[in-house]
């Protein structure tokens, strides 16, 4: 099973990107976690752009996210919510309605901050936006506080749990789809 890992931070030393790398190391057997980059290449969403040939960055986003078995997001918190670039990517992947890359996609959300709340509000907002975009949001928030002090063993265990939740949810979804076909 291929899980795309999308960090909401473009920063080279990002704790959230590091969290996704830790998830790749903690992955259960049979789960391949692949870091996806491209949020910074996207234009700001406008419905006007849907009418013409789509920019390469948007086509790549929609193709890659649609092809993934599941997506694991790691979000920082900016002023109590999701970074604008990440929200913009979710908006692009939420259209066109009915055939959007996020429609029925199995997703999970984790987040890291240097403060004591572990990007909890951003995770809640991202879960809401993903759900409204048609994704199936699995599990609970995983708030990693004081990320600048490193990740302890419990973080690695919880990352593994999140990935296992994605595997189970994906298998359940596939068996429903097979039964309905
Ligand atoms: C514009 C901006 C706003 C921020 N707002 C919050 C916030 O509301 N809550 C919080 O816990 N941390 C906040 N922070 C601190 C981030 O948690 C910290 O910069 C974190 O390391 C960002 O994630 P990254 O390491 O993946 O880039 C903010 C940082 C920036 C740059």
Image (cartoon, helix red, strand yellow):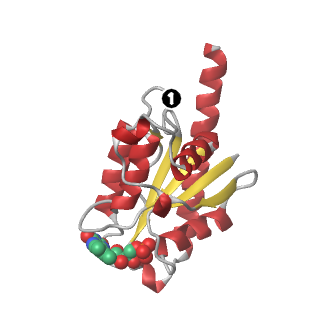
Residue 101's spot in the image, x, y percent?
A: 52, 38
User: x, y percentage for residue 62?
Assistant: 54, 43
Q: Quarter containing ligand 1?
A: bottom left
Q: Quadrant of residue 115?
A: bottom left
Point 61% across, 69% down: residue: 21
* Residue at the (64%, 35%) spot, across then down: 171
Q: Nearer the viewer, residue 142 or 38?
A: 38
| Residue 47 relative to residue 157: left or right | left
- Pointer 1: residues within 10 angstroms few (<14), some, or many (20+)? few
Residue at the far left in the pictured view? 79
Figure quadrant of the C terminus: top right
Q: Indicate the position of residue 17 as horizontal and vertical percent values.
A: 53, 70
Asked whether residue 116 appears in the rendered view, the answer is no
Placement of 11 over or under 166, stated as above or below:
below
Q: Give the secondary structure at mark 1.
A: loop
At 46% from the left and 56% from the top, the residue drawn is: 42
Is 147 rendered above or below residue 181? below
- In this figure, which residue is indicated by the disc labeled 1? 99
């Amino acid at each position: 099973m291929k899980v795309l890992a999308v960090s909401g931070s473009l920063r080279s030393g990002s704790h959230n990107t590091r969290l996704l790398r830790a998830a790749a190391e903690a992955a259960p057997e049979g789960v391949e976690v692949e870091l996806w980059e491209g949020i910074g290449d996207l234009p700001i969403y406008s419905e006007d752009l849907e009418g013409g040939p789509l920019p390469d960055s948007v086509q790549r986003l929609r193709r890659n996210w649609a092809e993934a078995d599941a997506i694991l997001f790691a979000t920082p918190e900016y002023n109590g919510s999701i970074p604008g670039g990440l929200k913009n990517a979710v908006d692009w992947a939420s259209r066109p309605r009915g055939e959007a890359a996020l429609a029925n996609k199995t997703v999970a959300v984790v987040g890291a901050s240097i403060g004591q709340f572990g990007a909890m509000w951003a995770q809640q907002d991202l879960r809401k936006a993903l759900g409204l975009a048609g994704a199936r949001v699995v599990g609970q928030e995983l708030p990693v506080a004081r990320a600048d002090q490193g990740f302890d063993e419990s973080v690695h265990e919880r990352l593994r749990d999140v990935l296992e939740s994605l595997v189970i949810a994906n298998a359940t979804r596939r068996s429903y789809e097979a039964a309905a076909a």
